[in-house]
Image: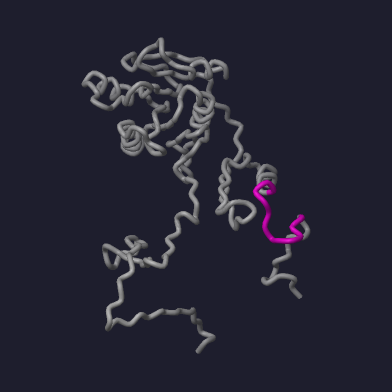
Amino acid sequence: MYRGTLPGWWLGEQDGRFDEPYVSPRRWELELRAAGFDGLDAVVLDSKEPHQLNAMMIVKASTDKTPSKHVTLLCHEISKPGPILGELERRGYTVDMRLINELPLPAGQDVIALLDMDQPFFENITSELLEAFKKLITTLDKSGIFWVTNPCQMHCPDPRFAQVIGIARTMRSEVLVDFATCEVDNINSSSDLIADVFAKFQLREEDETFKPEMEYAISNRSVNVGRIFPFSLKEELSISGPNDRVSIRTNNPGRLGDLHWSRKALEILQSDYVEVEPYATGLNFKVW
């Protein structure tokens, strides 16, 4: 005799699951660490606690690899590296300061580019700077470049900075360069988070199954990646009101990907119109 609605529902009694077959994210973290994984990188609930039904968790296998403590800091002026230089030195990095036209770069160490500190680097770029950037990309070899820029995908105040996003994606796909971008809403107050993300970028692995993250956005001192963006399901739902209706429409009949919900005001019934309220129910083979 089963004590639940499904066979085997209570098979977890022996490992502490007395009241339900699932466990909390905290229990998952303990079990994953015991199995050789790192702690949870992120946990996203589908609703606010305690009303959630699902939890999306991101975790990776534990590694003993430590990031290199040698880095090249690329900026427009050697005298204006900002607080990032101090944060890197505080963490034990040996920092090589360079201008973009000072090539070749030291071999075997990643590059942090601060070329978007004052204004968009690629906006009205000169031919000299463009040539210097092209030489930089061709001389990176196995090193990667970590480009710090202003917000352009989350809470974007100036879309001109978004040019580097397209350039980085092109470099990754066509030139096979490890070109990461890190958008920051306040570079001066988030230097510690920039260093954290850079350390994670340094630990990227050549894995054909799971590609490393190459786009980060630091907003309100919270690190975001493109796979996860918080939203309220309640706010996203399209619910019809007393004076309108919500229907599913398509701009290209026959293509399921073009189906979308559309809101439309109710039409006033004419004298010869009839209003029909439809009902529907599911059927299966047992009904016949």
Q: How is the image coloured?
A: one colour
Residue under the point 48% across and 15% down: 95
Helix, strand or loop: magenta stretch = loop
Q: Would residue 21 be counted in the magenta stretch?
A: yes
Name the residue located 42 percent from the left edge and 28 percent from the top edge: 146
Q: Residue at x 30, y 76 (%)?
A: 269
In terms of depth relative to the viewer, which is nearer, 256 or 178?
256
Residue lying at the far left of the rendered structure: 127
Q: Is residue 245 left or right of residue 229?
A: left
Q: Which segment did they paint magenta? A: 16-27
Q: Nearer the viewer, residue 182 or 177?
A: 182
Residue at the image point whose x is 42% and y is 61% from the top:
238
In this view, 147 is above or below 44: above
* Residue 102 coordinates in the image, percent (x, y): 34, 13
Q: Position of residue 17 (x, y in %)?
A: 74, 58
* Image location of residue 25, percent across then percent down: 65, 48
Residue sitting nearer the eye, 21 or 201: 21
